[in-house]
Image: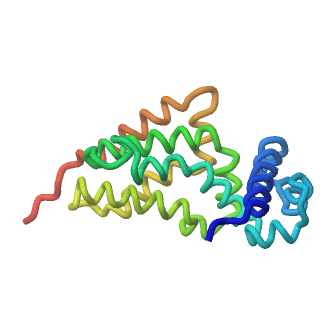
Amino acid sequence: MPERADAARNRRALLRAAEALLAEHGREHVSLDRVAAAAGVGKGTVFRRFGSRTGLFQALLEERAQAIATGIAGGPPPLGPGAPPGERLTAFLDALADLAARNTALLAANERACAQDRFTDPTYLRWHRHVTDLLAEARPDLDAAFCAHALLGLFDADLVGPLTADGGTERFRTSLRALAEAILSAPRPVSG
C-alpha cells in the first residue's frame, strides 16, 4: 500500500530536520525531541516513524545510499549489471567513497547509534552482500564474506574523515581500488 501523502511529507520533513541538525550541531545534538521540533511534528510521530534515534540515522543513510542501490540493481555498467565483477566492485567502491566523503558526519552518527549492531545495519548488510557476491563470482577460491568486511571496514567514519579531509577523496578512492585489485589478483592457492 502506498504511503499516505501526509506520512510521506512528515518523513521527508523529519529526515531534512535530522540532516540539518547533524550538519549544524553534530550527532550529539540530534535528539528525537529536537528533530520533532525542527520538523514541526510531535515527538510521537518520530517514534512511530523511526522507532529510535538509531532508526532515524539508518533511514537517513538508506536515503543517501538509494542512488547506489538503484545503480546496482538496474543502472548502466559498470555499477549496474553487465560488467565483469571486478569492474562492478571498483565502480561500487568509487560510488561508496564519494558517498562517504560527502556524508562522514552521518556515517559517524549511524555507527555510534548502531554501536555493537552496526554490522547488522540494513544498509551495511546490503553493501556487504553485494561485495561478497562480486568477490565470490570473481574469485570463488577466496573467503568472499571476510574480504567484503575487510573492504567495507575502510569506510569507518573515524578513518574516512582524516583520509578525505582537504579534498583527499581521490587518494581514498585510488587506494580502495588498489586494495580491491590486490585482493582480486592475489595468487590462487595451490592444492597440494
Residue reaching furthest top?
167
| Residue 10 appears anywhere in the view | yes
Describe residue 24's horizontal placement relative to residue 87 as left or right: right
Task: Return the x and y of residue 66 as percentages of the image width and height.
Answer: 55, 51
Q: From the viewer's perspective, is residue 179 above or below residue 145?
A: above
- Quadrant of the snapshot with the N terminus: bottom right
The image position of residue 188, as x and y in percent, is 17, 54
Residue 128: x %, y % from top left: 44, 60
**Residue 179 visible, this orientation:** no
**Does residue 17 appear left or right of residue 108 in this picture?**
right
Does residue 150 lie above or below 117 as drawn? Answer: above
Q: Is 34 on the left-hand or right-hand side of 129?
A: right
Looking at this view, is 182 or 23 the one in front? 23
- In this picture the colour scheme is rainbow
Task: State which quarter of the image contains the C terminus.
Answer: bottom left
| Residue at image coords 89%, 61% | 41
| Foreground pick, 104 / 4 | 4
The part of the image, by quadrant, that contains residue 148 is: bottom left
* Residue 52 spot, x, y in % from top left: 76, 69
Q: How many labels does the image show?
A: 0
Seen from the viewer's position, the closer of residues 52 and 144 is 52
- Identify the residue shown where x is 28% and y is 60%: 136
Q: In the displayed image of the protein, which residue is found farthest to the left?
A: 192
Q: Residue at x 69, y 60 (%)?
A: 112
